Image (cartoon, helix red, strand yellow):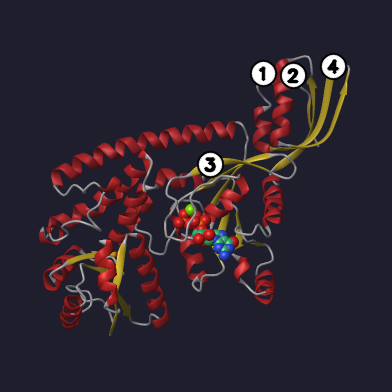
Amino acid sequence: MYILFPMADRRTSAASGKERAALVGLRTGSARRVDADQSLDELAGLADAAGAAVVLRMLQERQKPDSATFIGSGKVASLAAACAEADVDVVIFDNELTPAQLGQLGDRLDRKVIDRTQLILDIFARRAKTREGKWQVELAQLKYLLPRLAGSGTALSRLGGGIGTRGPGETKLETDRRRIRVRIQAIQKEIDQVRQRRSQLRDRRHKQSVPTVALVGYTNAGKTTLFNRLTRETAEASDALFVTLDPLIRQVRLPDRRELLMSDTVGFIDRLPHALVAAFRATLEEVAEADLALHVIDVSSPERERQIAAVKRVLEEVGATTVPVIDVYNKVDTLSPDEQRRLRTADPAAALISARTGKGVDELLQMVASRVALDTRRITITFDSGKEFDRQQIARLYRVARVLSHVATNGRVVIEADVPRRFIERLTTPSVGENAVDAV
Ligand SMILES: Nc1nc2c(ncn2[C@@H]2O[C@H](COP(=O)(O)OP(=O)(O)OP(=O)(O)O)[C@@H](O)[C@H]2O)c(=O)[nH]1
Ligand SMILES: [Mg+2]
């Protein structure tokens, strides 16, 4: 079964120079029809993000994938005919194909064939802006490509240009196996250095005891919109997939004047290519090392539950399972009051917000403040206000702790405060050791 889109599309896409894409999905065994359809919808969103115009959709049903042609020989023949009729440039499969399948399908369809993984990698290649982001994407692309160069060289020679051949910055990807190996090593080295630098920065932040909160969530959930609202930033947010690639970290001031650092980073997706997760480890470590994660969930998506599950899987994969999480249901402006009530009853511990209108954002900040404050001890510290070092410590205390009382007499300052445990550890340095610290 396939759907051919109106021919008017052909003129539009030719005029805009877009590649004309056919999308192919496979529904196997007990998989639900609606899930397979939604998966193809998502693939269409990805194709759009890669700059293609979708002119054909096909959903094949069979017990299990065919080892040679994935969708079965007969189906390939009808797909080839449909592709010829619709003047398709590239056929995109909703699954990861084996090198053998890629070769077979390329031969039989006689046009460029790519899979879901290549499509996602291509979007990332288009979006990467920083040096670090570019390295990570290219590494993932080359690692995906290498084993596929082994068998049939034709599958790749057929790629020509466009989607699937672009490296970061739209340069053409290397396809010579020996050169790829050398390049992988060089990039790996650079990424290791980045990783070290990031880890040093994190250590420094850790020493300053500023809590960090990471925004995580499915792509397009509204992470950057929320980030901008909380930090008064103007990072790019838009209704396209994978707009954010590189992590951004900015300060947020809580209602009680304490500071924390908030990070925005790459969004997740169902079946996120493993090569990509591995390559983005340096970026994703920001999440694994955070004190708290806000899981931003798009309530307007019909696939909310599947997206939530996909995010949890990625968090596991990047080793972020011990980070405490607050579920943040975003885009509640799209829900009726009734639906909002149901959501609140179903998950009372979650936050309901609209990053776009600002609704619920203050309550969310209160929740963050109390969660971040959980790991504190109430202590009383005496400072010598004549000493520069002590005056600095007092200023820092105000930034990281919740100060309950501050009494200054005869050059002494006595402060009672709820202090993060990590900060208390810092109070054992020699000069601070002179200060009297009483835990309550
Ligand atoms: N209706 C509504 N739309 C929202 C809300 N928050 C964000 N959006 C829209 O959702 C789309 C995605 O927002 P982003 O902030 O870019 O999402 P993201 O999670 O950062 O996405 P990626 O970086 O691409 O993974 C944009 O079109 C936003 O305007 C909201 O509260 N309500
Ligand atoms: Mg974003």
Residue at image coords 25%, 39%? 185
Task: Name the residue tied to disc 4.
Answer: 411
Q: Amino acid at mark 3?
A: Ile
**Mark closer to the observer (2, 4):** 4
Specify few, some or many for label 2: CA neighbours under 10 Å numbering under 14, 14-19, or 20 or more.
Answer: few
For the N terminus, the quadrant is: bottom left
Instruction: Confirm or deny contact between disc 2 and disc 4 (CB under 8 A).
Output: no
**Mark closer to the observer (1, 4):** 4
First of labels 3, 1 by sequence position: 3
Specify few, some or many for label 3: CA neighbours under 10 Å numbering under 14, 14-19, or 20 or more.
Answer: some
Q: Amino acid at mark 1?
A: Pro
Task: Name the residue tied to disc 3.
Answer: 249
Residue at image coords 32%, 60%? 51
Pinpoint residue 338: horizontal percent, then vertical percent.
Answer: 68, 77
Distance from Cα at disc 1 to Cα at disc 4:
20 Å
**Mark closer to the observer (2, 3):** 3
Task: Name the residue tied to disc 1.
Answer: 430
Label 2's element?
loop
Pinpoint residue 89: horizontal percent, then vertical percent.
Answer: 20, 67
40 sits left or right of 321 in the view: left
Q: Is residue 10 above or below residue 429?
A: below
Instruction: Confirm or deny contact between disc 1 and disc 2 (CB under 8 A).
Output: yes
